[in-house]
């Protein structure tokens, strides 16, 4: 028979003890009490990257671009990879297609994700209602959009003929836009060799080199950086048939 201390108070019938009323075992000296409570983001619920992932669009203008669409995929709890396409528009000054991609890392304790190479001017903030705010405009998650998972693009699936162009959006400089044909040859799943023939002002030019998959915070991405080149010279592949970097290109065969 269990003995009850004389000074103990029996609970009233039907009374439910609150967590803070429950007796806890004392913590021994030198030990740390562990709690499973999670901190919340300041001013908003902390969203997981799975909740953020999906397909977005922007009906209005975002950073001087229109007809915007964006895909977001997660890279662990604090990093995402985005693919964005639209049309740069500034009447009588510049117009032209635009595609850009890259990774963004979370500002600790918030729903703001920034570009590590441009952390002060390229911040995107997500909200629980499906809104993503960047600059002077908002993206909105498309109705029925499903959560997206990162799919690693194998360099061996990129092998073949590609065609693309780098459009200079400023109208007076349209004749300086460059068009090119590229052949990619896979070296392994993370590297490929490229040989390129481009044309600008009807003047042909050739180039070659190798590109290696970019890793960020230990996560593999679908960006391939030019070996020995400018750090921001990265081609981001949405899938095995579409890429964007300094230009936009599609796989032909």
Image (spheres, helix red, strand yellow):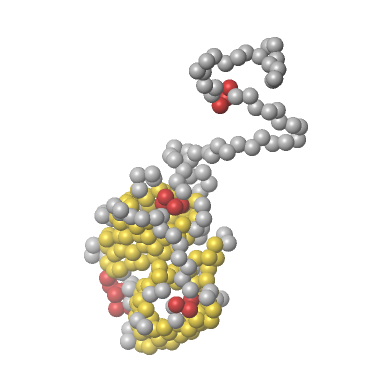
The single residue placed furthest to the top in the displayed view is: 6
Foreground of the two, 196 or 29: 29
Residue drawn where x is 44% and y is 69% of the image: 236
Pinpoint residue 190: horizontal percent, then vertical percent. Answer: 53, 74
The reply to whether residue 165 is in sight is yes
Q: Quadrant of the C terminus?
A: bottom left
The single residue placed furthest to the right in the displayed view is: 29
Foreground of the two, 30 or 56: 30
Total number of numbered discs in the rendering: 0
Pinpoint residue 159: horizontal percent, then vertical percent. Answer: 44, 81
Note whether 29 is above or below 149 in the view shown.
above
Q: Quadrant of the N terminus?
A: top right
Note whether 86 is above or below 110 in the view shown.
below
Judge left or right: residue 36 versus residue 149: right
Foreground of the two, 131 or 171: 131
Residue drawn where x is 71% and y is 31% of the image: 27
Residue 6 position by quadrant: top right
Judge left or right: residue 246 versus residue 31: left
The single residue placed furthest to the front in the displayed view is: 1
Pinpoint residue 117: horizontal percent, then vertical percent. Answer: 50, 60
Residue drawn where x is 42% and y is 50% of the image: 51
Residue drawn where x is 33% and y is 72% of the image: 168
Pinpoint residue 34: horizontal percent, then vertical percent. Answer: 64, 37
The reply to whether residue 233 is in sight is no
């Amino acid at each position: 028979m269990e003995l009850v201390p004389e000074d103990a108070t029996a609970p009233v019938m039907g009374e439910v003890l609150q967590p803070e009323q429950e007796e806890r075992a004392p913590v021994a000296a030198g030990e740390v009490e562990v709690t499973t409570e999670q901190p919340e983001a300041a001013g908003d619920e902390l969203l997981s990257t799975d909740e953020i992932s999906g397909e977005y669009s922007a009906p209005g203008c975002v950073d001087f671009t229109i007809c915007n669409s964006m895909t977001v995929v997660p890279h662990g709890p604090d990093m995402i990879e985005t693919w964005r396409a639209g049309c740069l528009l500034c009447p009588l000054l510049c117009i032209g297609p635009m595609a850009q991609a890259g990774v963004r890392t979370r500002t600790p304790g918030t729903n703001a994700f920034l570009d590590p190479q441009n952390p002060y001017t390229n911040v995107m903030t997500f909200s629980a209602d499906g809104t993503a705010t960047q600059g002077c405009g908002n993206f909105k998650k498309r109705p029925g959009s499903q959560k997206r998972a990162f799919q690693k693009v194998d360099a061996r699936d990129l092998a073949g003929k590609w065609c693309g162009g780098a459009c200079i959006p400023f109208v007076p400089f349209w004749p300086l836009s460059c068009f090119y044909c590229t052949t990619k040859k896979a070296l392994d799943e993370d590297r490929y060799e490229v040989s390129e023939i481009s044309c600008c002002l009807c003047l042909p030019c050739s180039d070659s080199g190798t590109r290696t998959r970019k890793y960020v915070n230990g996560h593999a991405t679908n960006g391939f950086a030019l070996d020995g080149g400018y750090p921001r010279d990265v081609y981001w592949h949405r899938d095995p048939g579409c890429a964007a970097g300094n230009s936009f290109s599609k796989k032909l065969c």
